[in-house]
Amino acid sequence: MSSAKDTTSFLLKKYHGGHVVIRLALGGATNRPFYRIVAAYNKRARDSKYIEQLGSYDPLPNIHNEKLVAFNYERIKYWIACGAHTTKPVAKLLGLAGFFPLHPMTITEAERRQKAASIEEVTTDNQEQVEQKETL
Amino acid sequence: MLRALSRCHTPVVRLLSPRTAVLIETVRGRKSRTDPKAKSKLGLVKTPPPVDPGEMVVLKERYTEYSLILRALRLEFKEQMLRKKYEEEVGSVAEERAKREAEEHRSLMALNDAENLRMFQNREQRMQKEAEAAELKKREAAILHQQELENYIKEKERQILLLQEEAKDFITPDNLDQRIEEALDNPKNYNFAIDKEGRVVKRTAFQR
C-alpha cells in the first residue's frame, strides 16, 4: 500500500513511520472559522501542505440555519483503502453524512441532551404547578 | 515559550479510569516550564468528569460495533481499489486500451502510407516535367549555337569576298609606277561646299 501513497508526488518529504490522516485544516478569519477536510501526513502542521483536499466544513450556520459540509467520496474511499486514519470530528461528520456508521459519541451526546431537556421540562412544570398553587 | 501537548488524545471516558484524582502535570497555553502555579489554583485538586456506569457499558458496546463496522468498511474499500487497479493494469480495461491503440496505430500508418504515395507521385511528375523542359532547352541551345556558328561563318565569308574585291584596287609594288602616273595625270579636286539643304556646290570661290 505504501506504493500507492508514494506515487502521489516525488516532492513529498519522506517520513519515518508517519501515516496519512484525514482531518480538518482550519482557515478563515478572526471569529470566522472555516475547515477544509484534507488528507495530510500525520507529522505535518495542521494548516500546512497537505496531500489532497477532500472537502470542506463550515461550522457557522448560514441564512437557512444549515451547516454546509462537502465530501469527495471517491477520493475518501481511495485514501481509506490506502490506510488513512480519520480524526474524531471527521468521523462524526462522515457518520452524520451516512458514509460511516453513526459515531457512538454522537448518539450518547444526543441522548444526554434529550435527558437534560426532559429534566428541565419536568422542573419547569413543577415550578409552574407550585406557582399556581401559591396564587390559588 | 514551549507549547507542551497533553498526555493523550483519547478521551478520558475511553480509558475507563477509576474515580481517583489524576493530576495532569503538563501545562498547555500561556505558561512556560518555569512559571509558578497561580495563587487561586494552589489548593486545587482536579478530578476527571464523572462517569455513568450504565452509559459506559452501552458506550462500550457501541464502540465495539462501530470499530467492527469501520474495519469491515476499510477492508472492503481496499479490495475495491485493488480490483480496480488490477482491471486497469491487467484486465479488461487494459485489453480494450491496447486494442484501441493498435487500431489507432494502424489507421495512422495507413494515412501515412497514402500521404507518402501521393507525395511520391507528385515528385515523379515534377521530375518528368523538369527533365522534358531541360531536354527542350538543350535542343534549343544546340540549334542556337549551330545558327550562330553559321552566321559567323557567313559573315566571315562576306568579309573575305569584300576584301578580295578591294584587293583588286590595291597598290602593289608592281602597280606602283603605273598608279603614280595615273594619279599625276588625273588631279582630283576635293573642294566643295555644302549648304543647309544638303546641296553640294563644286564651283567655289577659290577655283581658278
Image: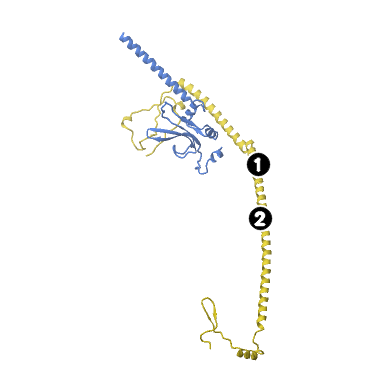
Chain colours: A blue, B yellow
User: B128 above or below A120?
Assistant: below
Left or right placement of residue B151 versus residue A67 in this view: right
Secondary structure, mark 1, is: helix
- Subunit of label 2: B
Q: Amino acid at mark 2?
A: Arg
Disc 1 is attached to a residue of which chain?
Answer: B
B22 or A97: nearer the eye? A97
Query: Picture coordinates of residue B189 (x, y %)?
Result: 56, 86
Percent coordinates x, y for residue B83 in the rendering: 60, 34
- Looking at the rendered structure, whether the residues under marks 1 and 2 are on a common chain is answered as yes
Quadrant of the drawing holding the N terminus of chain B: top left
- Quick one: label 1 or label 2, which is nearer the N terminus? 1
Q: Is residue A14 left or right of residue B162?
A: left
Mark 1 and 2 residues: CB-CB less than 8 Å, in contact?
no
Percent position of residue A105, x then y: 46, 25
Residue at position x 56%, y 31% in the image: B77
Which mark, by number, is residue B103? 1
Q: Residues within 10 Å of mark 1 (few under 14, many from 20)?
A: few
The residue drawn where x is 67% and y is 54% is B125
Structural crowding at the residue carrying mark 2, measured as other residues with C-alpha within 10 Å and reported as few (<14), some (14–19) or many (≥20): few
Which residue is depicted at the point 68% across and 71% down?
Answer: B150
Local secondary structure at mark 2: helix
Instruction: Indicate whether B98 appears above or below B168.
Output: above
Q: Position of residue B29 (x, y in %)?
A: 37, 35
Is A76 situated left or right of B23 in this image? right
Q: CA distance from mark 1 to mark 2?
A: 35 Å
Q: Three-letter amino acid code at disc 1?
A: Glu
Q: Which mark is residue B126?
A: 2
